[in-house]
């Protein structure tokens, strides 16, 4: 049960957030990442139109 | 210019936000503001070459933390307030031509955690009384940026549809001693005809009183008032049932199915909402592969929805398309 409960938690890792001010100087932006500091899980961009 | 204007006929606020007339409208290829900023490329809203999940303040907000003074003076008949609040954009994939349905369960699970974090943060603002997490998907529901994304509005009051539900739940509890939404779920599980998908923590169904042919609700199997009440295991189950129902939607007519997703948490005004249960509602506008459900005379003018279909039949259609999560 414990393993089942932690299935995605272990795969995805801990959530971390980095809050910054946007280039317009007035709005905020928050980057959410998951996993170890060195091995942040990120999507690869397959295309950009 | 933006402000809240009171409608004394309906007893509710309307937001005016004239700057939104200039918001980005179907940008040409290469100029999507929600794509990553590529080296040497068009600077989008997100100044990184890739990202996992990003949340930022809407460039064209209906509500702002520091709103301008109202453009008109209020009166006893027509009260006016600054349009104070927060409008956030939630971008959950850097892939322009994707959708929430196409995300792996692990990415939807990440999004659940981000939504939980945003609900907690925005609920803590002293001027916020309701945090509304939603997604508009598809041109059929008015989307102007096709890049997959959701939104969050933090309102300075409880909006009318939510307020009406809260009152219904409060009255039901006072009369019956039980929670209305828990009783709806219990009744639906006993009947079974309108169930679409289930797991340990959540149940998806077409409600008895569906207003849209493929309207779908997700209810928690255990008591919860807000997203922040759920454990990571429950968020995982919520991600799994999202994946199942969104995939079933897409398979219905073999199209990327448009919908409005509305998450109903308890209000964030600090009052006791023990009579209210968290739930999620999807309002898809498609009624057949080629026809849309429009809000016409009865719906828009009288507030009475006419559903041309039977919820029992539509639930059966969706249920047949639900696949197990492996």
Image (cartoon, coloured by chain):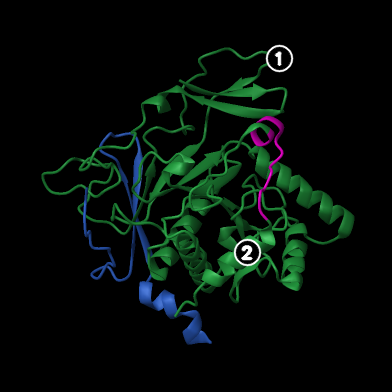
**Residue at 83% of width from left, 53% of height from top?**
B172
Residue at image location 46% in from the left, 43% down from the top = B140
Of the image marks 1 and 2, the number of the one nearer the N terminus: 1
Does the segment drawn in magenta span residue A27?
no
Q: Does residue B204 appear in the picture of this structure?
A: no
Residue B187 lies left or right of residue B279; in this view the side is right
- Specify the segment rendered in magenta: B298-309
Residue B182, given in percent of the width and then of the height, sits at: 74, 64
Examine the image and state in which quarter residue A10 appears: bottom left
**Measured along the vertical axis of the image, is residue B183 above or below residue B81?**
below
> What residue did someone put label 2 on?
B315
Observer-nearest of B196 and B9: B196
Residue B49 position, x and y percent, is: 20, 53
**x and y percentages locating residue B70 in the rendered image:** 52, 18
Q: Kindly report which numbered mark, 1 or 2, lies closer to the viewer in this rendering.
A: 2
Q: Is residue B194 left or right of residue B37?
A: right
Q: Badge 2 sits on which subunit?
A: B
- Residue assigned mark 1: B76
Q: Colour of chain B?
A: green
Viewed as shown, does residue B53 lie left or right of B173?
Answer: left
* Number of marks drawn: 2
Query: Helix or strand or loop: what does disc 2 sit on?
Result: helix
Chain drawn blue, letter?
Answer: A
How crowded pointer 1 is (Cα within 10 Å; few <14, some 14-19, many 20+) is rated as few
């Amino acid at each position: 049960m414990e393993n089942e409960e932690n299935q995605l938690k272990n795969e995805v890792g801990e959530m971390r957030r980095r809050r910054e001010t946007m280039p317009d100087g007035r709005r905020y932006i928050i980057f959410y990442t998951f996993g170890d500091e060195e091995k942040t899980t990120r999507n690869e961009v397959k295309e950009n139109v | 210019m933006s402000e809240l204007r009171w409608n004394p006929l309906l007893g509710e606020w309307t937001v005016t936000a004239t700057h939104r007339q200039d918001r980005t409208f179907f940008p040409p290829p290469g100029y999507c503001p929600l794509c990553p900023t590529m080296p040497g490329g068009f600077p989008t809203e997100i100044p990184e070459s890739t990202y996992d999940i990003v949340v930022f303040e809407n460039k064209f907000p209906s509500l702002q933390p520091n709103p301008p003074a109202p453009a008109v003076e209020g009166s006893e008949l027509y009260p006016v307030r600054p349009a104070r609040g927060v409008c956030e954009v939630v971008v959950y994939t850097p892939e322009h031509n994707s959708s929430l349905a196409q995300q792996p369960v692990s990415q939807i699970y990440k999004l659940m955690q981000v939504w939980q974090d945003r609900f907690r943060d925005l609920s803590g603002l002293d001027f916020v009384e309701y945090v509304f997490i939603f997604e508009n998907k598809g041109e059929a529901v008015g989307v102007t940026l096709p890049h997959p994304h959701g939104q969050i509005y933090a309102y300075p009051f409880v909006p009318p549809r939510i307020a009406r539900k809260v009152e219904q739940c409060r009255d039901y509890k006072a009369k019956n001693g039980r929670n209305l939404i828990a009783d709806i779920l219990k009744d639906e599980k006993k009947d079974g005809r309108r169930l679409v998908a289930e797991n340990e923590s959540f149940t998806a169904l077409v409600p008895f009183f569906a207003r849209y042919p493929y309207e779908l609700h997700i209810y928690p199997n255990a008591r919860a008032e807000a997203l922040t009440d759920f454990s990571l295991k429950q968020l995982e189950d919520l991600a799994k049932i999202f994946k199942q129902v969104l995939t079933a939607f897409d398979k219905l007519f073999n199209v990327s199915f448009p919908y409005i997703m509305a998450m109903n948490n308890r209000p964030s005004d600090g009052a006791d909402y023990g009579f209210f249960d968290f739930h999620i509602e999807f309002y898809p506008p498609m009624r057949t592969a080629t026809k849309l459900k429009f809000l016409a005379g009865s719906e828009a003018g009288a507030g009475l929805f006419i559903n041309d279909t039977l919820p029992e039949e539509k639930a059966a259609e969706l249920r047949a398309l639900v696949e197990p999560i492996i």
